[in-house]
């Protein structure tokens, strides 16, 4: 078994003649919370798409708990223990909150395509769904259609769906985008609560979220990781300040965290 939950080795991705990811190396230990930051167009979303199997790399290796996943499909990677959320909320709008979560837990409990089973009789699936409802604080919205939730509640539901299968590595793509300051603050705590003991990678633009959530920060600029360290070390890194944060941004936005 690898000592790393997720490892990228000389990862590269070209679109035509354009090199988007340029030899990324990154090693994330089990249980670490890592924020991936960088300017627009740096390659952050492409990196997430490579890790989760939406894109295949041009070259390089992606290891999940020591096993190569760079040529596997997204569903195969998910079954190996990696789950991701997306920038755009990705839930079933015409199903209730409970039904959304239960759909997500069925496969992990081994039910697969069992058309002859009544869902109401699946005690373990229903109990696990109730646990998730409690974790994401949507108990009171159990029977509400997902389409009728507030934006922040929909994002919380998506977090619940993402962790429902029991994956140990969680990828969150801009989880607090579009939220108010108070919603963001509550959401940081929710993410911390539901990822206890899990490995987390999150792409995030809000530096308050980054410094409030991450154990380490990976700074991506022009498809390369130019720094990977603790928030304090990254904030003090001259290369990072020059390429991305800039001293005023680092002082003003990251202060107090």
Image (cartoon, helix red, strand yellow):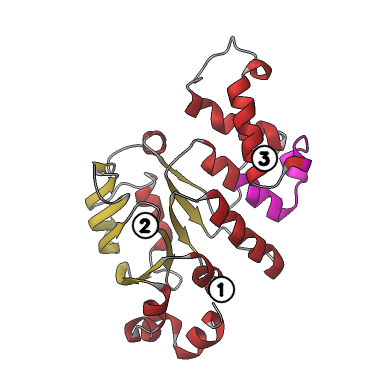
> Where does the image place residue 87, in percent across and percent down from the top left?
55, 55
In the image, is residue 152 part of the stretch drawn in magenta?
yes
Name the mark nearer the viewer: 1 or 2. 1
> Where does the image place residue 176, in percent across and percent down from the top left?
60, 61
Q: Earlier in the sequence, mark 1 or mark 2?
A: 2
Label 2 vs label 3: CA separation?
31 Å
Q: Which range of residues does the magenta coloring cover?
A: 140-158
Number of the label disc, if any, that sits on residue 76:
none
Residue at (45% x, 89% y) in the render:
247
Residue to which mark 3 is pinned: 133
Q: Main secondary structure of the magenta part?
A: helix
Label 2 secondary element: helix
Badge 3: residue crowd in 10 Å (few <14, some 14–19, many ≥20): many
Label 1 vs label 2: CA separation?
22 Å
Which quadrant of the figure has residue 185? bottom right
> Where does the image place residue 140, in percent across and percent down from the top left?
78, 42
Number of the label disc, if any, that sits on residue 208:
1
Residue to which mark 2 is pinned: 47
Left or right: residue 211 compared with residue 143: left
């Amino acid at each position: 078994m690898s000592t790393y939950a997720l490892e990228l080795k000389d990862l590269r991705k070209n679109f035509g003649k354009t090199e988007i990811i340029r030899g990324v190396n990154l090693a994330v230990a089990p249980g670490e919370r890592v924020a991936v930051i960088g300017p627009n167009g740096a390659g952050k979303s492409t990196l997430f798409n490579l890790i989760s199997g939406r894109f295949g790399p041009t070259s390089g290796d992606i290891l999940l708990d020591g096993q190569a996943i760079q040529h596997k499909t997204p569903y195969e990677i998910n079954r190996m223990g990696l789950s991701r959320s997306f920038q755009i909320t990705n839930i079933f709008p015409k199903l209730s909150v409970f039904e959304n979560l239960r759909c997500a837990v069925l496969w992990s409990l081994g039910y697969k395509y069992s058309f002859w089973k009544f869902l109401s009789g699946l005690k373990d699936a229903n109990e696990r769904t109730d646990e998730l409802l409690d974790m994401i604080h949507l108990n009171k919205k159990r029977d509400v259609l997902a389409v009728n939730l507030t934006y922040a509640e929909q994002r919380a539901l998506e977090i619940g769906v993402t962790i429902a299968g029991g994956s140990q590595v969680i990828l969150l793509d801009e989880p607090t985008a579009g939220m108010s300051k108070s919603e963001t603050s509550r959401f940081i705590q929710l993410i911390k609560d539901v990822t206890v003991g899990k490995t987390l990678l999150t792409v995030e633009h809000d530096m308050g979220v980054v410094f409030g959530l991450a154990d380490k920060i990976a700074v991506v600029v022009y498809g390369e990781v130019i720094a990977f360290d603790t928030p304090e070390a990254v904030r003090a890194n001259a290369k990072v300040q020059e390429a991305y944060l800039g001293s005023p941004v680092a002082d003003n936005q990251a202060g107090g965290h």
